[in-house]
Image (cartoon, grey):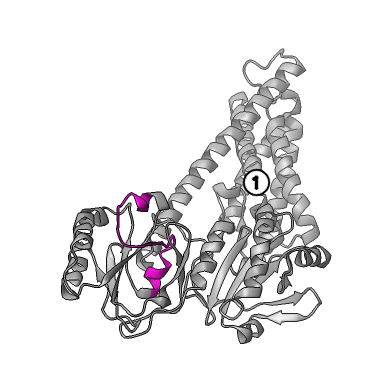
Amino acid sequence: MNLILLISRLVLAAVFGVAGVAKLFDFVGSRKSLADFGVPGFLAAPLAVLLPLAELTCAVAFLPDSSVWWAARGVIVLLALFIVGIGISLARGRTPNCHCFGQLSSSPVSWKTVARNAVLLVPAVLLAAEGRENPGGLPGFAGWTAFESAMVVMAVALAAIAGVTVWLLVHALRQNGRILMRVEALEKKAGIDPTKEAIPGLPPDTPAPAFEVKRLNGETVTLDMLRKKNDRLLLIFAAPGCSACEELLPEVGQWQREHSDKVLTVLISQGDVETNRAKAAKHNLEEVLIENGHDVSEAYRVDATPGAVLVMDGIIGRPLAIGPEAIRVLMTRALLPSPVKKGEPVPAMTLPDLNGDRVNLASLRGRRTMLLFWNPSCPYCQGMLEDVKQWEKEPPAGAPGLLVISSGEPEANRAEGFRAPVLLDAIFGAGLVFGAGGTPSALVIGEDGKVESDVAVGAPDVLALVERHS
């Protein structure tokens, strides 16, 4: 009989210990399960904590001989409640999920669940009947002090918690593995390259999200209202206390005053009206809008300030620019003339030479000129450098004059040794305007100031272009 009682104690301690720990780790599921069984909402949350604690208390109480009888009675009460609750739900035709063991076992209840609890009632009743006189003593517990017994109980409880934690971790890792496999399959189906670095902000060619904000005077402004002024908008997002934003604000005011005909620069700021009104007065800002919280910046996926988005014809024109320098580059590109093709006049566009003097490309009239797009760090450029210098030294009769438009620092370009003038174009803006896809590339401007040739790309084609137009 002692062996039967001992086995009963151990089985019930294990079952209710695992169930209690698992429920604590699955609080959300336990609360939902109680609500599905008809427990009022205001009771579901506290019961989702009290129930596993009661199960753990019973499990621990099965270990010392002195508390076996009380543990058995507690288990009988819990099992009776489970059986009645499940039975009522089944009688009503409802089969909610039973998170009896938390995430370890979550399935709809059935009469099998009732039968399982009824089976557990048998050893609990046996221990309740025999527990006071014969609790089925655990070997080695006899004669232990209360402190020693408590230490063993804590060790067992911690071991149970550790075991359940390890199981849940393994279960979570397996689940994450399955999710990752599904994500990879979806990415492959959608043609997404997961190794490719994500571009911040909304992708170019995405429709610009509509918005409704307030000016400093309280007037409501929408995206459509701004587009009626100019269909090229530079939306700059700023925040109070942002030192980089403060650095950029004087230039923002200058852009608003000098370039509103080409690009309408709009500052969309966070913070209160008074703070922004003071900044607007300090930096002579003309168009300052106050967003409600982070609604507009979140819609445009701007998660850092200062950030800027170029909107052209109602769509995102270029990737998001973050930081003063990137925004300056974005503005410079936004101010570029429209792309030109063969037969069209060279647009007005000024670039600095190696001494800092500004040269307007629209002034290239009266003599045929070859524009050579260059980069000192380009190996293909270096491969044809001597050919270009030889051509400069002994140009064929009727050859066009040479004008180099180059990236890189002034010193690097001086070291190239060109006889021809060299204009600096750090952002390759002129290349974009004339349709040059990279370096080296070239085209010829006629005496009338119009584009005379198509763009030649690559050293062989550039040298061939020289021969054709000589």
Q: Is residue 75 above or below residue 29?
A: above
Residue 303, horizontal then vertical, whole percent: 61, 59
Q: Which residue is mark 1?
A: 23
Q: Is residue 394 left or right of residue 119?
A: left
Mark 1 is on which residue type? Lys
Q: Is residue 114 magenta?
A: no
Q: Quadrant of residue 324?
A: bottom right
User: Does any portion of residue 23 appear in the rendered image?
Assistant: yes
Nearer-the-camera pick, 374 or 411: 411
Q: Is disc 1 placed on a helix, strand or loop?
A: helix
Q: Residue 373 appears in which quarter of the rendering?
A: bottom left
Q: Position of residue 298 (x, y in %)?
A: 63, 66
From the viewer's perspective, is 356 left or right of 129? left
Q: Which residues are magenta?
A: 412-433
Instruction: Identify the image quadrant of the C terminus.
Output: bottom left
Quadrant in which residue 40 is drawn: bottom right
How far across and how far down the image is residue 334, in percent? 51, 72
Residue 167 at x, y percent in the picture:
52, 40
Which quadrant is the N terminus positioned in?
Answer: top right
Kindly tell me whether residue 5 is visible in this rendering.
Answer: no
Please name whichever residue, 242 or 256, is drawn nearer the observer in this view of the structure: 256
Tell me what residue is drawn at x 67 percent, y 17 percent: 141
* Magenta highlight on residue 423: yes
Question: Could you classify mark 1 by the number of other residues whose Cα lies within 10 Å: few (under 14), some (14-19), or many (20 or more)?
Answer: many
Q: From this viewpoint, which residue is outermost toward the top?
A: 143
